[in-house]
């Protein structure tokens, strides 16, 4: 078990800690780099809460469990954390994993503030126990579809693997683009090698290819194949799920990592709080923090505010989502009931479409904002 130590100078009126369970992908096949950034944000915020006196004098303790992108493992972790007496759950990056965790949290009556997962149907039925910081997939991916149209793309191929998340993304794009003159061509990556993708793109006269596949593979191999095919020199490669956000993308692809637009949940300019947190996260990570690290920090900021105001009783925490008003790193966080979304939702975190600058792949360019 990994915990965040309470600082030696923390004031304590009660020797017991207030525990928050953290669900994070830290090993493969989970997206480990995303998990590392998420955990860095969670841990930084816990440290700051404890430096400021904890939860009414009680130190905050983060009890971390590795989900490894496995829904069953995540559900088992929720059961274990509930038995350990956590006041609430935080975290998770992968949507399908967060959906399994949310179902267990709802069944057990355990408050869960989901940091990063975007799948609209995070729970099958509306629930009072779960809230979410990340924008719903339908909202973010429609903004991405607007970007595609504004950039002149109407014949869009999607290289997709089987997954509820990827299938949902393809459906959102198809439903949004079709009435606006766009065509979505689905390429089943169970049947196609990365090199065969190139032939399909030529045959279908696609002007854009979206990667609805895992990272690093087969995403990296697909990009390399397409970039080396002279017939496809003008095609745009996109990755709405955010694969190019992390340094590993640039390390694996070099110059080919640039000019691949993706969704990022950051404002054009960070608030003073955001700037301070960015500096601390950069020091902790030894690299530029991704939006996922900010999501982790904001998750703890919200939960700490709720626990200070309403105590550690689980039902009272769940009842308080509607009253949250917390200044996060990316704006004021408040939750509401949003049509078509089954959980309490921050509507909405800022959304950008960005890419890595071909002239300087470590620098991001904002191409579109929603």
Image: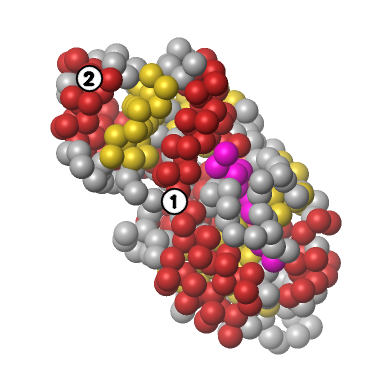
Tell me, yes or no, if residue 200 can be seen here.
Answer: yes
Residue 312 place in picture, x, y as percent: 75, 76
Mark 2 or mark 1, earlier in chain = 1
Task: State which quarter of the image contains the C terminus.
Answer: top right
Few, some or many C-alpha atoms within 10 Å of disc 1 (few <14, some 14-19, many ≥20)? few
Q: Which residue is mark 1?
A: 164
Q: Which residue corresponds to the image point at 69% horizontal and 85% vertical from the top-left?
A: 16
Residue 68 place in picture, x, y as percent: 38, 64
The residue range painted magenta reads 129-138
Residue 163 place in picture, x, y as percent: 39, 51
User: Which one is in front, 210 or 327?
Assistant: 210
Quadrant in the picture for residue 224? top left
Quadrant in the picture for residue 276? top right
Compared to residue 263, the image places residue 216 above or below, namely below
Give the spatial CA distance, label 2 vs label 1.
27 Å
Dot 2: what SS? Answer: helix
User: Which one is in front, 67 or 305?
Assistant: 67
Tell me, yes or no, if residue 3 can be seen here.
Answer: no
Compared to residue 206, the image places residue 165 above or below, namely below
Q: From the viewer's perspective, is 283 left or right of 320? A: left
**130 in the magenta segment:** yes
Q: Which residue corresponds to the image point at 52% horizontal and 60% vertical from the top-left?
A: 98
Disc sitting over residue 366 in the figure: none
**1 in the magenta segment:** no
Q: Which residue is mark 2?
A: 203
Compared to residue 314, the image places residue 267 above or below, namely above
Q: Which residue corresponds to the image point at 27% horizontal and 27% vertical from the top-left?
A: 255
Compared to residue 292, the image places residue 208 above or below, namely above
Residue 306 place in picture, x, y as percent: 77, 64
């Amino acid at each position: 078990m990994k915990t965040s130590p309470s600082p030696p100078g923390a004031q304590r009126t009660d020797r017991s800690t207030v525990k928050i369970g953290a669900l994070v992908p830290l090993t493969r096949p989970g997206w480990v780099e995303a998990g590392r950034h998420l955990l860095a944000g969670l841990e930084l915020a816990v440290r700051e809460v404890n430096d400021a006196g904890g939860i009414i004098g009680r130190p905050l303790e983060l009890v971390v469990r590795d989900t490894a992108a496995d829904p069953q493992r995540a559900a088992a972790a929720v059961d274990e954390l509930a038995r350990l007496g956590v006041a609430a759950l935080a975290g998770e990056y992968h949507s399908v994993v967060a959906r399994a965790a949310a179902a267990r949290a709802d069944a057990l009556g355990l408050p869960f503030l989901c940091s990063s997962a975007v799948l609209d149907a995070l729970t099958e039925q509306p629930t009072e126990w779960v809230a979410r910081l990340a924008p719903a997939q339908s909202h973010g991916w429609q903004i991405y579809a607007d970007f595609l149209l504004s950039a002149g793309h109407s014949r869009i191929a999607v290289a997709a693997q089987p997954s509820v998340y990827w299938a949902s993304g393809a459906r959102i794009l198809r439903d949004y683009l079709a009435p606006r003159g766009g065509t979505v061509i689905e390429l089943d990556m169970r049947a196609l090698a990365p090199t065969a993708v190139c032939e399909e793109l030529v045959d279908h006269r696609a002007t854009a290819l979206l990667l609805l596949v895992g990272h690093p593979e087969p995403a990296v191999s697909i990009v390399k194949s397409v970039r080396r095919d002279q017939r496809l020199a003008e095609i745009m490669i996109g990755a709405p799920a955010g694969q190019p956000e992390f340094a590993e993308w640039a390390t694996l692809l070099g110059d080919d990592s640039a000019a691949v637009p993706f969704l990022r949940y950051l404002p054009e300019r960070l608030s003073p709080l955001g700037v301070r947190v960015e500096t601390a996260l950069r020091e902790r990570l030894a690299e530029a923090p991704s939006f996922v690290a900010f999501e982790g920090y904001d998750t703890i900021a919200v939960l700490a505010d709720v626990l200070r105001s309403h105590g550690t009783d689980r039902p009272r925490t769940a009842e308080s989502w509607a009253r949250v008003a917390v200044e996060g790193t990316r704006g004021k966080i408040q939750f509401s009931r949003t049509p078509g979304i089954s959980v309490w939702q921050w509507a909405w975190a800022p959304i950008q479409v960005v890419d890595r600058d071909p002239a300087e792949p470590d620098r991001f360019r904002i191409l579109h904002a929603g």
